[in-house]
Amino acid sequence: MSGKYDLVIVGGGISGASLLYTTAKFTDIDSIALVEKESEIAAINSDHTNNSQTLHFGDIETNYTLDKAEKVKEGAEILAGYLENHDPDREMHAKRSKMVLAVGDDEVDALESRYHDEGFGDLFPKLRAIGRDEIEELEPKVVEGRDPSLDLLALQTPDGYVVDYGATAKSLVDNATEEPNVDVFTSTEVTDVTKGYDGYTLTTTDGQFDCDATVVAAGSHSLQMAKELGYGQDKVLLPIAGSFFLADDFLNGKVYTLQMKKLPFAAVHGDADVHDPSITRFGPTAKLVPTLERGRLSTVGDFLDVFGLNVAAFLSYANILADRILLPYVLRNLVYDLPEVGRRAFLPHVQKVVPSAELDDIERATGYGGVRPQIVDTKKKSLDMGEAKIVGDDVIFNITPSPGASTSLKNAMRDTRTLMDFFDGEYEFDEDAFRADTIDNFPRADD
């Protein structure tokens, strides 16, 4: 198969699917194609077993500043609005209580300050500060067996959206392909991208595609393709593999713990699985791996392509891993993969959420967890925790839009605006209709 298109999107995860939906439904672009190397849409990181299933609003993520939370909030509300509008039977998502838990005087003081003084209570009208009794009503296991002398506080909200991002991506693609100008090609791997006089040529395992503009939303592979076209030469990847431990029916919703200071990775939390609330997942762990996809040794070579094996890359890794907080954290996470030893080492994290949990209550989840690429700036020799997007000449590379799937439709909205600039006014984006289909359906506190 091959053809000429105005726009070709590379990657059929939640990011590529969101852009396909936005451009197909709310622009008048004449011809759009999506190419995906797997045989199914959303088969890698967007699959519900390979991510935290969380829709991040910024309300209980204590590593977010107020400014970042404000930006993330809109993105989460856009996706939540899509789910409210297109998934009334809750086949792709569930709504449950969600809270961040503070234990002890220091954590309680920090959480109270965040809520009252830093503005998070004002930004999130549904967010409530609750004490031990209300925590116990919502999550009995969080209080059961806990030292009664310890002070407890939680910031709780009913907006605990638990999402099957794989099913959501398939929904977006299915809705997009209702339009006659849209083609979707699976089992079609891009092997080469070249810039021509008038657009791009994508060579794939299933033929050649020519297009005026292209957006690469291929996760870790996006930077690999960007470098082939001369972009992102000052960036490399630090791939982090997340894993989970499972327990039976401990929690009703999602319970976060406070973020460890100076650590860029998510704090350990517990939550009920999106499709089976009798299963509680604890995690994620964060293990450094030299691959771009979890469990696929074939992507080691891809990692080396992105890493570059140059002095700047090695010095950047050395500078990051020399941090006296980050290095012990990385080493601890390697231990969690070890048989038996890993469970014992991880149990205290589970017990911070569920004090009565015992070793026999948890088991390492097999077949769960994906790879999240952390961007490394080789000029600054540091992790770049912002949104990883490269915009070039009629091309966009989305590497890891922060915080991932939660802002996928907002990211698609912004990319669509950029595409309109690429096309020099030839096409139009009906953003009002996009908002009416998505964020306008998000339930407000005063509804």
Image (cartoon, rainbow, N blue to C red):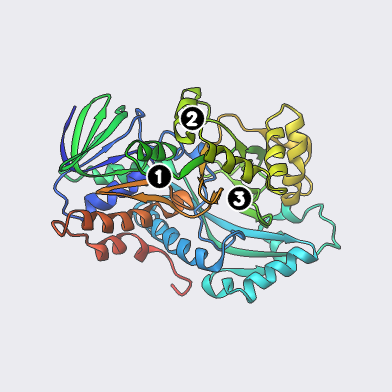
Distance from the alpha carbon under mark 3 to that under mark 2: 26 Å
In the image, residue 286 sits, relative to residue 96, either above or below, namely: above
Q: Residue at x 49, y 55 (%)?
A: 386
Question: Between marks 2 and 1, how big is the CA–CA gap?
Answer: 15 Å
Counting other residues with Cα less than 10 Å from the Cα at mark 1, is it few (<14), some (14-19), or many (20 or more)? many
Residue shown at 39% from the left, 60% from the top: 78
Q: Nearer the viewer, residue 406 or 65?
A: 65
The disc labelled 1 sits on which kind of residue?
Gly
Q: Is 45 situated above or below 88?
A: above
N-term-proximal mark, 1 vs 3: 1
Q: Kindly state the secondary structure of the residue where label 2 is placed.
A: helix
| Residue position for label 1 | 232
Residue 409, horizontal then vertical, whole percent: 36, 54
The residue beneath circle 3 is: 266
- The answer to whether residue 161 is seen in the rendering is yes
Where does label 2 land, which residue? 304
State the residue at coordinates (66%, 48%): 268
Which residue type does callout 2 highlight? Answer: Leu
Q: What residue is rendered at 45% in x and 64% in y?
A: 71
Q: x, y (%) of residue 90?
A: 43, 49
Give the mark toward the camera: 3 or 2. 2
Crowding at dot 2, Cα within 10 Å, few <14 / some 14-19 / many 20+, comes out as: some
- Around disc 3, counting alpha carbons within 10 Å, would you say few (fewer than 14), some (14 to 19), or many (20 or more)? some
- Given the image, on which type of amino acid does mark 3 rest? Ala
Q: Position of residue 52 (x, y in %)?
A: 54, 45
Residue 45 is left or right of residue 203, and the answer is right
User: Count of labels shown?
Assistant: 3
